[in-house]
Amino acid sequence: MKTRQLGNTDLHITPIGFGAWAIGGGNWSFGWGEQDDSESVAAIQRALDLGINWIDTAAAYGLGHSEEVVARALKGRAEKPYIFTKCSLVWNEGDYAATNRLKAQSIRSEVENSLRRLQVETIDLYQVHWPVPDEDLEEGWQTMAELQKAGKVRYIGASNFNVSQLKRAQAIAPVNALQPPYSLVKREAEQELLPYCQKNNIGVIVYSPMQSGLLSGAMTRERVAKFPENDHRRRRAEFQEPQLSRNLALAEKLRDIALLYGRTPGEAAIAWVLANPAVTGAIVGARNPEQVNATIGAAEFRLTQLDLDEIENFFKVGA
């Protein structure tokens, strides 16, 4: 699998990486319902066996559980992938929800906990999960830069920052990578964020390229209706009417295009994201090996200009 250089770093990453959000399970406010850890481990190992060379997780996913599962999946593997994780969302024992914090003491404590859970000595890319509280952004980013100098992390990145916040961080230390949401359903990053990152050589790894499974081709109204109470997608507007019908129609349009190449709708959705020259890689979540198999082809799938035009026409004409 070919790799791409991540912005101004020396990391060369595959076009898609393994997203470990869902495998954290449902024991927190943004969980995806119950998850079988053995299936999670098998999914990670399948992704790595097929050539993926990076995993994106976060301390908050499952309130630490996702990082622990990643460590379990990597135990005993001779060749280890890059590990990316995040800070700034913390919780107290027994809490269901995480709280935003960017104070130096909090971030220093978080990195030690992530290193312990991941069972590594250095984190390849450490990212501020959310720039909240905004007034603490400078203190948080200064701390991130200090962790980099101390060798705790190789590179530092920002997740969910806007351009103004990126500039504030850059005034303290370089931003090595940005992680924004980006998909055919959520395209706001095209306006300012992606052009800014491309101009300033900031690597971009986008999350939710299939919009939390909506564009995978496996989502139906019936499946959405049966989401368990601890699946955060029940509360998301894009999974509710009137957006749900339009998003499912978009998935069918992607299916029509993907069939021409023997691909899945999810692979088409991911390939569309990767077609943007500002995007270095896409984070693709999976909860079992079969889901990995259904999306891995996106790494080398290239949509033609005619395909891209047909997708754009969907938005112009309407579902």
Image (spheres, helix red, strand yellow):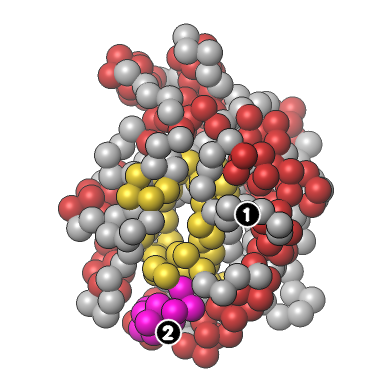
| 172 horizontally vs 219: left or right | left
Q: Which mark is residue 273?
A: none
What amino acid is labelled 1 in the image?
A: Ala
**Residue receiving disc 2:** 150
Q: Nearer the viewer, residue 1 or 55?
A: 1
Asked whether 235 or 190 is in front, the reply is 190
Dot 2: within a 10 Å radius of its alpha carbon, few (fewer than 14), some, or many (20 or more) residues?
Answer: few
Quarter where residue 304 is shown:
top left
> Is 156 situated left or right of 193 in this image?
right
**x%, y% of residue 1?**
46, 35
Name the residue at 68% across, 61% down: 71
Q: Residue furthest left?
A: 199
Residue 220 percent across, percent down from the top left:
67, 26
Q: Are marks 2 and 1 in contact (CB under 8 Å)?
A: no
Marks 2 and 1, the one that precedes in the sequence: 1
Instruction: Name the residue at the front extreme.
Output: 78
Q: Which residues are magenta?
A: 140-153
Which residue reaches farthest top? 260
Residue 234, given in percent of the width and then of the height, sits at 68, 45
Residue at 38 percent across and 50 percent down: it is 12
State the residue in front, 220 or 19: 19
Question: In the image, what residue type sits under mark 2?
Answer: Ala
Residue beneath the point at 42% across and 48% down? 13
Q: Say which quarter of the image contains residue 162.
A: bottom left
Q: Describe residue 48's horizontal placement relative to residue 311 as left or right.
A: right
Badge 1: residue crowd in 10 Å (few <14, some 14–19, many ≥20): few
Visible in this render: residue 133?
no
Q: Residue at x 76, y 80 (%)?
A: 93
Name the residue beneath numbered marker 1.
Answer: 78
Secondary structure state at the residue bearing disc 2:
loop
Residue 78 spot, x, y in % from top left: 63, 54
